[in-house]
Each structure stands twice: as structure tokens, then as C-alpha cells.
Image (cartoon, grey):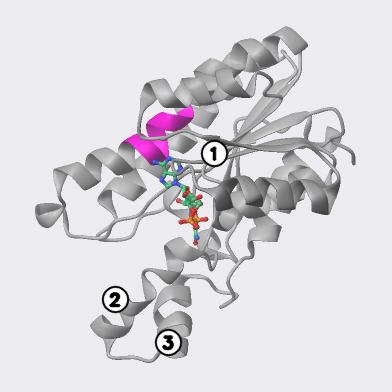
Amino acid sequence: MSLAGKTAVVTGSNSGIGLGVAHELARAGADVVINSFTNRDEDHALAAEIAAEHGVSVRYIQADMSDAAACRALIEQAGVCDILVNNAGIQYVAAIEEFPTDKWNAIIAINMSSAFHTTAAALPLMRAKGWGRIVNVASAHGLTASPYKSAYVAAKHGVVGLSKVTALETAGAGITCNAVCPGYVLTPLVEAQIPDQMKKHGMDRETVIKQVMLERQPSRQFATTAQIGGTVAFLCSPAADQITGTTLSVDGGWTAM
Ligand code: NAD
């Protein structure tokens, strides 16, 4: 499969899953725009590194996905967007009664509303070419729930719903939209949850990973960022031309339970 000649915009891609997706799309030959809210030398250096590794063009564009105008400006600045991967996301864990309003608002904005704004900006570019792929990185939490993750679960269920609506509005236009639903992937977002879980359960790192974090993931193995990237690349391939409006779980069996 070759994505040569296509340009992909991947939100939240200077780390974790987004970075894995950027690598896999670049490996398949796509030019890539990587993004986060920072504007550091290392962000631009990372773009140069991916470009050198895969022999494609990679640009870093700063845009804060909590800001509607910035989401739309990201696509405008990219200029071309054949493949849009909405991946930026954050997490916060607390009971509903204690959940801070600002954390709720930030999670809904970054994890869900950003996908609406980038999609709205990208669709005219895709329609003009008669080809486009939108892949929203949702989560097993887009299909099922866990306590203390109200904003995250609400946002990810929202992203799954948005993916279905986008698919219906673009059906037959050469554009597809799907949601990838990872289970646990060992990234900085998940790494940050480990110390709290160790403290809460009085367990060491390995035990908390196997018995608490991967408790609902029957394989008892993390998915990798490259596997999520490979799944996104598959959804951009001709084999996936008729796959639209659905979810693809990469969760070691979590949602089969
Ligand atoms: P991560 O913390 O490694 O990466 C998150 C990315 O989003 C980073 O590049 C960060 O800079 C970016 N980001 C955060 N706030 C932003 C903002 N305001 N504007 C622009 N970019 C911003 O986390 P990750 O685990 O790679 O998560 C990536 C996506 O995958 C998220 O949507 C997350 O919900 C989803 N996901 C992760 C897991 C997992 O187990 N790691 C499982 C299911 C779904």
C-alpha cells in the first residue's frame, strides 16, 4: 500500500499514539503534518527526524486543540489535508462530585470538539479532491465505561457518534470516517496514571500494570503505538474504501468481555 502523494494531518502527535501514527503514515509514503500546543525547537526537530527516517516531507504546526479557531487554523495552515487523524487527548480521573469544571471543559474541548472543528475545516479540501480519510482516535472508553473517567468516557462516546455522522454525510463522496478504539497503550498519558494506581492499591509497578490497568484487557498486554498507527494506515488503504462509520477496536479483547 502506498500513500505517496497524500498529506496527513495528525493532531497531538509529538508524543505517544499520534507520533506512532505519524511514523506509520510516513512509512507508507504520506507527507505528514504533526501538531501539538507547544512550539519548541524539539517539536520541529522531531518533524525533521520523521522526514529523514521515511524520506517524506514532515512539518510541525503549533495549534492548541482546546481552541476552536486554532483547530480550524491548523487545517488552513496545512493547506492540504487528504488524511485527518484526530488524536489529541488528555485524561483526568476523579469522582463526578469532585470533578473540576475546568478539567471537564478541557477534556470535552480537546478530546471531542477539536475533531468536529478540524473535520469541518478539512471536508471542503477532501470533497474538492473526491478523496479523503478521517480517522478519529477514540478509545475502548468510546464503547464502554469506567468509573471516575466521566469527561473522558463522555468525550470518547461523542467521538464515536461524530464519526458515524461524518461517515453518513460523506458516504459516496470518496471520503470515509472511522474511529479506532485502543485499549491500553503504554504512552506518557498512561504512564502518568501508574504512580497514583501504585499508591492507591499498595502495589509495585509490574503488579499494578498486570492486575489493575490490564485487568480488563484479556491479552494482559499493552497495544503498541505502531499497532495503532498500522491500523490507521490500513483504514487509509484501498482495502478500506467501503469501511466507514464504524469502530475498529485494538484492545486485546477488552470489548469482547
Ligand atoms: P500522550 O499524552 O502521549 O499524547 C497526547 C498528545 O496530545 C500529545 O502529543 C500532546 O502534546 C497532545 N495534546 C494534548 N493537549 C493538546 C492540545 N491542547 N492541543 C494539541 N495537542 C495536545 O497520550 P496518548 O496515550 O498517546 O493519547 C493519544 C490519544 O489516544 C488520546 O486521544 C487518548 O485519549 C487516546 N487513547 C489512548 C490510550 C492509551 O492507553 N494510551 C487508549 C485509548 C485511547
What residue is disc 1 on? 11
**In terms of secondary structure, where does tag 1 sit?**
loop
- Category of crowding for the residue at label 3, using alpha-carbon neighbours closer than 10 angstroms: few (below 14), some (14–19), many (at least 20): few
**In terms of secondary structure, where does tag 2 sit?**
helix
- When asked about the image quadrant of residue 191, the answer is bottom left
Pointer 1 residue Cβ closer than 8 Å to ligand 1: yes
**In terms of secondary structure, where does tag 3 sit?**
helix
Between disc 3 and disc 1, the foreground one is 1
What residue is disc 3 on? 205
As measured in the structure, the alpha-carbon distance from the residue carrying label 1 to the one carrying label 2 is: 27 Å
Which residue is pictured at 68% across the width and 11% down the height? 127
Q: Position of residue 174 (x, y in %)?
A: 75, 18
What residue is disc 2 on? 196
Q: Position of residue 180 (x, y in %)?
A: 59, 46
Q: Is residue 18 above or below residue 199?
A: above
Q: Magenta residues, as a range?
A: 109-115
**Res. 236 in view:** no
Which residue is pictured at 23% across the width and 47% down the height? 103
Q: Amino acid at mark 3?
A: Arg
Q: Amino acid at mark 1?
A: Thr
